[in-house]
Image (cartoon, rainbow, N blue to C red):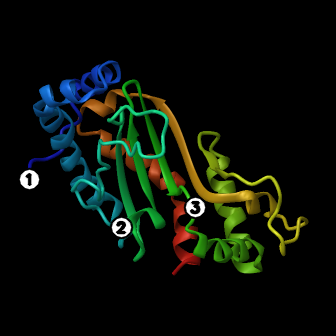
Amino acid sequence: MDKFSGFPKESINFYKELSLNNNKRWFDDHKDDYENFVLKPARHFVYEMGNKLKTISPKIIADPRINKSIFRIFRDVRFSKDKTPYKTHLGLWFWEGDRKRMECSGYYLQIEPDSILLGTGIYMFPKNLLETYRNALASEKFGKQFSSAVKKITDTGIYHIGGKSLKKIPRGYESNNKNAEFLLFEGLYSGFSTEIPDAFFNETFIDYCMAHYIKMRPLHDWIVEIFS
């Protein structure tokens, strides 16, 4: 496989144009652009980024197929008022665990027409794992580890912690727990977004992403440990 040499400017142009022409006819006319300027470099990125991530998370899964590490471009419009057929961003996912890929913690990259988003964690806990998560927050061992992980990440002043969706602490849990705020979370992730950096267009983008993933790694490691 060819080495990753950056995403071409045409990949950004593809999503800018798609945002203005989100229909099947336009997409069919530009399938070759999608393959050559988006999917081809994305596969190279997944392969090399996966090898890089294995130096800090040896069991990480990097699979350069659609619906594996590369999210499909087609939107699920069955329950949405927005019926536009295509996503106007590229999502890449590296996960760790034996459950379904989106039920595991991992490292994420999202490429928009004018920005990127980097993150770690799990966007939404499966219902059968919520109790394990909440009990871990309340335990002495995992509670302390969690507080330490969050502090390391937020002290950078760069990353946010997301996943809050509830207004009341779930029944059966104490509100005076030092991690009580996070009992309102049904997902747990860290991340940040920024304008597309110069590194995006060359091979240094691997190291750029890796530097951020390392700083957000404590949250990923904590999630993996409590579910192992």
Q: Where residue 188 appears, x then y in whole percent?
A: 60, 58
Res. 56 image quadrant: bottom left
Label 2 residue SS? loop
Mark 1 is surrounded, within 10 Å at the Cα level, by few (under 14), some (14 to 19) or many (20 or more) other residues, namely few
Mark 3 is surrounded, within 10 Å at the Cα level, by few (under 14), some (14 to 19) or many (20 or more) other residues, namely many
Mark 1 residue type: Met
Label 1 residue SS? loop
Mark 2 residue type: Ile
Which of disc 2 and disc 1 is earlier in sequence?
1
Q: Which residue is mark 1?
A: 1
Q: Where residue 122 appears, x then y in whole percent?
A: 52, 59
Q: Is 110 in front, or is 75?
A: 75
Residue at point 59%, 43% (across, down): 159
Res. 174 image quadrant: bottom right
Q: Which residue is mark 2?
A: 60
Residue 147 to residue 128: above or below:
above
Q: Where residue 39 appears, x then y in whole percent?
A: 19, 42
Residue 104 shows up from this direction: no
Which of disc 1 and disc 3 is earlier in sequence?
1
What distance separates the C-alpha of mark 1 from that of mark 2? 20 Å
Is 5 on the left-hand or right-hand side of 62?
left
Is 24 on the left-hand or right-hand side of 176?
left
Mark 3 residue type: Leu
Is 128 on the left-hand or right-hand side of 23?
right
Residue 205 to residue 60: above or below:
above
Residue at point 15%, 27% (across, down): 30
Q: Which residue is mark 3?
A: 219
Res. 128 image quadrant: bottom right
Q: Which mark is residue 89?
A: none
Residue at point 23%, 24% (across, down): 9
What distance separates the C-alpha of mark 3 from that of mark 1? 32 Å
Label 3 residue SS? helix
